[in-house]
Amino acid sequence: MKGRGKGAPSARISLRVLVSFITLSIAVLTSISFVLFSYVLFSSTELAGLRAKAEDVSTRLSRALAAPLWNMDAVSYKAVIASELADGALLGIVLRDESGHVIGEIGSFESEAFDVRRKDIFHDRARIGDVSVYVTNRGILKLYNSRIASILEFSWGMSAVIALMLF
């Protein structure tokens, strides 16, 4: 009987440790799954929105720059370009004439470009140039990284609380 009595408490302790380990593992796996799901959902919607923004800006600029480019009014086309760069998602805008020579550019263009949209500029149905819009996803990534950090902090905190409650 003595041997049986001594074995019982260690069996209960190992069972408690096993249950704790399983519970914590489930909590950690759940948080990791949530982070992955969040990443897929967030990235697909936000990046699609960013691509749509690049498309909209390039279309808007191709129309707005037609008259200034046709008249070779550098002050006007630079003002139009500069007004669009107020958006933090835009890295830079390049304006080219019909031969492809750069005649106006504002911002940075290659370093962090997530997407580039190029649209032809027409005046009276004649192609007179094109505009390229460079966008970045750095703002989206910063927001997403802070969300992930918050989720992970919460899940690790909850795991610690569960561990303390089980012991």
Image (cartoon, rainbow, N blue to C red):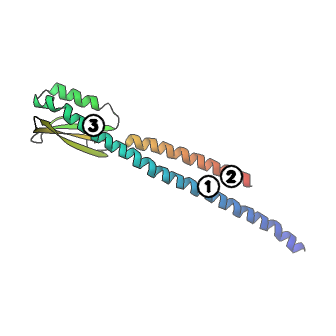
Q: CA distance from mark 2 to mark 1?
A: 9 Å
Relative to the observer, which residue lies in front, 144 or 59? Answer: 59
Q: x%, y% of residue 135? A: 30, 41
Q: Amino acid at mark 3?
A: Val
Dot 2 surroundings within 10 Å: few (below 14), some, or many (20 or more)? some
Relative to the observer, which residue lies in front, 136 or 4? Answer: 136
* Quadrant in which the N terminus appears: bottom right
Left or right, 73 with respect to 17, comes to left
Q: Amino acid at mark 1?
A: Ala
Left or right, 28 with respect to 53, comes to right
**Nearer mark to the viewer, of 3 and 2:** 3
Q: Amino acid at mark 2?
A: Ile
Earlier in the chain: of badge 3 and badge 2, it is 3
Earlier in the chain: of badge 1 and badge 3, it is 1
At x 18%, y 29%, the residue is 77
**Nearer mark to the viewer, of 1 and 3:** 3
Question: Can you tell which quarter of the image residue 118 is in?
Answer: top left
Residue 69 position (above or below residue 32): above
The answer to whether residue 110 of the structure is visible from this angle is no
Provide the residue designation for mark 3.
57
Q: CA distance from mark 1 to mark 3?
A: 44 Å
Provide the residue designation for mark 2.
162
Provide the residue designation for mark 1.
27
Q: x%, y% of residue 32? A: 54, 55
Determine whether label 2 and label 1 are within 8 Å by CB: yes
